[in-house]
Image (cartoon, rainbow, N blue to C red):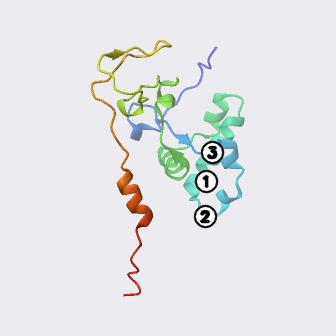
Amino acid sequence: QGQREIRFKKRLYTSFNVDLKKVRLREPLPMLTSMPSIYNRAKVSEECFEALQRLGEIRHSNRMSEANVLQMFPNAAMVTSIESKYGESISMEDILGVKPKKKIRSWERVDTGPVVEEEVVEDKKKEIVRLKGPTDDKNPEFDAYLKTRTSKDFLAE
């Protein structure tokens, strides 16, 4: 059951267009608001500090109408300042709300030797088609050269 009596006369976040602004913080909000460094104006701007304080107060308020009347919502510039100071990139899990299925890429496949026809992987995974033979990545002559090589002292010259 929502609080239908709440009305907002002014839009605070029109600069973010019609989409929701998603900000992922590097640290949890309670941890950020309890850090002593947020009071240092040389490290944290007043706008960013005010936004952190307002969001902390919203977390402790019981009603949305209380947050509205007390003007606890940070403005768009404040949200942007928090994002630039304490934000990190948003993953697909954050956007979709679920972990995306892991895709097996060609360079992540396990090399099991030369295979010309299709190889069916157990456990209901995708079929892996291998068209090339394994790559020879061993060079014993070069390894022996590296062991006997003497490095040149360019500073002494």
Residue at position x 48%, y 44% in the image: 76
Classify 10 Å Cα crowding around label 3: few (below 14), some (14-19), many (20 and above).
Answer: few
| Foreground disc of the pair 3, 2 | 3
Q: Position of residue 9 (x, y in %)?
A: 49, 32
Where disc 1 sits, the SS reads helix
Q: Earlier in the sequence, mark 3 or mark 1?
A: 3
| Pointers 3 and 2 in contact (C-beta within 8 Å) | no
What label sits on residue 117 in the rendered view? none
Residue 3 falls in image quadrant: top right
Q: Amino acid at mark 1?
A: Phe
* Residue 38 appears left or right of 155: right
Amino acid type, label 3:
Glu
Position of residue 131 measured from the top left corner of the image (x, y, whole percent): 27, 24
Q: Position of residue 122 (x, y in %)?
A: 48, 13
Q: What whole-number distance in Å separates the C-alpha atoms at marks 3 and 1?
A: 15 Å
On the rendered structure, is 29 left or right of 79? right
Whole-Å distance between the Cαs marked 1 and 2? 9 Å
Instruction: Report, in whole angstroms, how far the alpha carbon at label 3 lies from the one at label 2.
Output: 20 Å
Residue at 49% x, 36% y: name it.
22
- Quarter of the image with the C terminus in it: bottom left
> What label sits on residue 49 in the rendered view?
1
Residue at image mark 2: 41
Dot 2 surroundings within 10 Å: few (below 14), some, or many (20 or more)? few
* Quarter of the N terminus within the rendering: top right
Q: Nearer the viewer, residue 82 or 28?
A: 28
User: How many other residues sit within 10 Å of disc 1, few (<14), some (14-19) or many (≥20)?
Assistant: many
Residue at the disc numbered 3: 27
Q: Residue at x 68, y 28 (%)?
A: 63
